Image (cartoon, grey):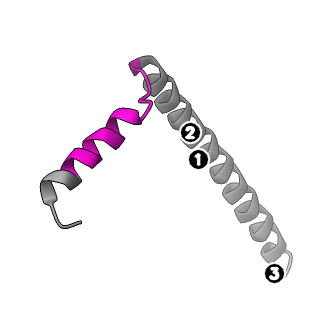
Amino acid sequence: MANPFEFLQQVRAEGAKVTWPTRRETMITTGLVILMVVVASIFFVAVDQSIRLALGFILSLGR
């Protein structure tokens, strides 16, 4: 890697070989990621609340 210009030409050549996603593919993938984040958030909130209620019930038995 003695010549920086040759390196940049090689980088450009490799970048041209990449199959870039279309705008539609990017939007669909983004939507699916957001949907999965929402689903995971709802799941973890439900699990957290269930554990909180169960522990509250168990601890209230000792009174």
- Work out whether residue 58 or residue 19 is closer to the camera in this orientation and state it: 19
43 is higher (above) or lower (below) than 52: above
Q: Which residue lies furthest to the bottom in this view?
A: 62
Distance (Cα) linking label 3 and label 2: 38 Å
Residue at mark 3: 63
For label 2, the SS is helix
Amino acid of disc 1: Ser
Q: Mark 1 against mark 3, which lies toward the viewer?
A: 1
Residue 9 image position (x, y, % from top left): 21, 45
- Work out whether residue 56 or residue 43 is closer to the camera in this orientation and state it: 43
Distance (Cα) linking label 1 and label 3: 34 Å
The magenta stretch is 8-23
User: Which residue occupies 67% across, 59% down?
Assistant: 48
Distance (Cα) linking label 1 and label 2: 5 Å
Residue 18 image position (x, y, % from top left): 41, 35
Residue at mark 1: 41
Amino acid of disc 3: Arg
For label 3, the SS is loop
